Amino acid sequence: MDRSKLYRRFRTLLIANRGEIACRVIRTARAMGLRTVAVYSEADRDAMHVALADEAVLLGPARARDSYLNVERLIEAARKTGAEAIHPGYGFLSENAEFAQACFDAGLVFVGPTAPMMTAMGSKSGSKALMEKAGVPLVPGYHGEAQDDATLAKAAEKVGFPILVKASAGGGGRGMRIVRSADELAPAIVSAKREAKAAFGDDRMLIEKYVDNPRHIEVQVIGDSHGNLLSLFERECTLQRRHQKVIEEAPSPTLNPAQRETVCAAARKAAGAVNYVGAGTIEFVSDGKDVFFIEMNTRLQVEHPVTELITGIDLVEWQLRVAFGEALPLKQDEIKLHGHAVEARVYAENPTKNFMPSAGKISTWRLPAETGGLRIDSGYREGDTVSPYYDAMLAKMIAWAPTRDVAIERLNRGLEESDVRGIVTNIPFLSALMTHPKVRANAIDTGFIERELTVLTQAPAAPGELELCAAVAAVINHERQAAQADANSPWQTFGWMPVGRRQRNFAFRAGHGVGHGSEQKITLNYGSGPATLVIGERELAFAIAPRDGGFDVTLDGVKSFVAAVIDGHELYLRTRNGRFDLHWVDPFGGEMEEQAGADKIAAPLPGTVVAVLAEEGAKLEKGAPILTLEVMKMEQTLRAPYAGVLKSIKCKVGDIVQEGVELAVVEPSGE
């Protein structure tokens, strides 16, 4: 290839992605003086990355294959806007060699490795063969081209159970299944292939020995077109769920300096096997003693900010400088490690409902200021809509400090001060994870979250006096804000009256919806003299004062900050005791219990039916799988709510179904 076509200075950059990573690339590109072009689907017309860019081009309908995965439309968007280069971000086409080649053929600079490099290292099976030749340690397994069931079964038996069935292309935990016995193998292969085909357009599989109680260590590398190749220390990504990283930190608290140098040297050797150019990550699994090569990600990683914070290097800037044809600005011995960084991925998902993705409009978006070692990379704002068509990640929160303990404390404080409403997020789950004693002690492995899931997703404590008083304050504050529209309103803190005392009664239930929890009553006494609240037999002096993001509530002389969001009769509160959802009981009565039953087998979100797992007329046990939906790029299996007979299936494979549509009917057995 002509190097002048591969690497050259450009002025206009198209970002072939969306969400947080598109915003991240746009910010650095603009800081470097580049003109930026965003692309978007019909679902993303009003997205944050579209607003940030200098220009934006509509690619097509919401589904990724019709927009963000459409190579021809991306190339055409570059031509229309005069873009000379394309940054792929991560996900979508970022590790697609055909896309990299198409950019080259169109005369565009691809900000990343060449297609041959991507082909060599992007294939898990192909890269393992290269690593074996280069002397990089590998996990025992099968990486061959033959993909028939008999070959895979024979390979699995030779390796020995438990094994990992894994998509040869792609990443992010998709197309990956742990198989602990021979009878689990066939259905695991079918499911993994289906998921890999949908996510990456490639259903080839490899088989690896599954390392029990493993740790996940990865090394950031970057190379230029002048033959320089550097490692930027390692990251620990052991805290995972369904093979998807949840928390990442750098450097690894597991490695000593000698082990750090060994694994970084192995990473440089791995990338050097293909004379790698661009940013990439070499991933390893550790059994506590040794490390084994897993794969190379030939792109920027989601967790790259932790590396940036411990090195002071802007990796996107370095990617762009490499694409300009420049040499890397530092040598290996000039890269220094400073402090510790920890990152948490904030997702629109419900941890208490098996991490079901959550879609909808963000009604409240309050994240802490980026000060005191806290950084937030986000792709959303208040009022934005979280689409069911794409990955559910909303933002990344990253904390830096001189030590790991302080970095964790800063991250947890940032999570505790975050309020996102209108959708369900994993923020409470992340807080529980970061405060778990074993996480603080680094006594973890990749199966830790699954083992501790009950503890990490337990219901919040019942609201106490502070929360009930805060609920009253939230209602009063909300009413006062509404009254401020009338400049002549006599409304004051607790309502206006010239003399005497009055009472007002409130009732709340824990949880959202009228059918949750027992009712708790509070009486507000106000008028002439100080206001008080009566809860049971206790009467407390009470005052409130508005403040950004909420208000201060004072009870018997103790002032506490409360964050509050009110939507109709639903209240969300954040106090020093945690997060609480309350329902304000209608003071005029007439509330009706919700009628939606838990037995309704309906689509929880818009999605695609990818498998029907039971036949009409089949007898089902409670929890038996009925069908599988692909929702937000993840498979969700819908199960029988009770023992009975599958009376009907109201969909077929390939159907695109909307939220709430009934998909199957189970007739109870009556036992």
Image (spheres, rainbow, N blue to C red):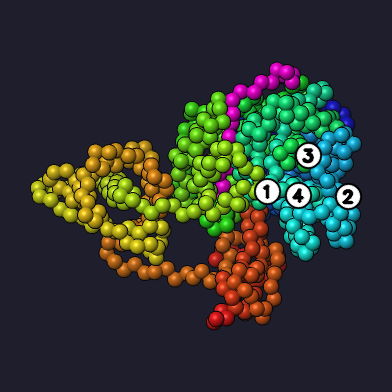
Q: Residue most toward the left?
A: 499
Who's the residue at 38% across and 62% down the image?
517
Of labels 1 and 4, earlier in sequence is: 4
Q: Nearer the viewer, mark 2 or mark 4?
A: 4
Task: Give the distance between the C-alpha atoms of the residues marked 3 and 4, in whole angstroms.
Answer: 12 Å
Q: Secondary structure at mark 3?
A: strand
Residue in the foreground of this view, choosing between 133 and 297 = 133
Amino acid bearing label 1? His
Of labels 2 and 4, earlier in sequence is: 2
Task: Give the distance between the C-alpha atoms of the residues marked 2 and 4, in whole angstroms.
Answer: 18 Å
Magenta region includes residue 335: yes
In the rendered structure, the answer to whether residue 22 lies left or right of residue 114 reads left
Name the residue carrying label 4: 210
Name the residue carrying label 3: 292
Horizontal and vertical percent for residue 445?
A: 65, 44
Q: Secondary structure at mark 1?
A: loop
In the rendered structure, the answer to whether residue 346 lies left or right of residue 367 reads right
From the viewer's perspective, is residue 626 above or below residue 319?
below
Task: Give the distance between the C-alpha atoms of the residues marked 2 and 1, in whole angstroms.
Answer: 23 Å
Amino acid bearing label 4? Tyr
Of labels 3 and 4, earlier in sequence is: 4
Q: Quadrant of the C terminus?
A: bottom right
Residue 144: mark in rendering:
2
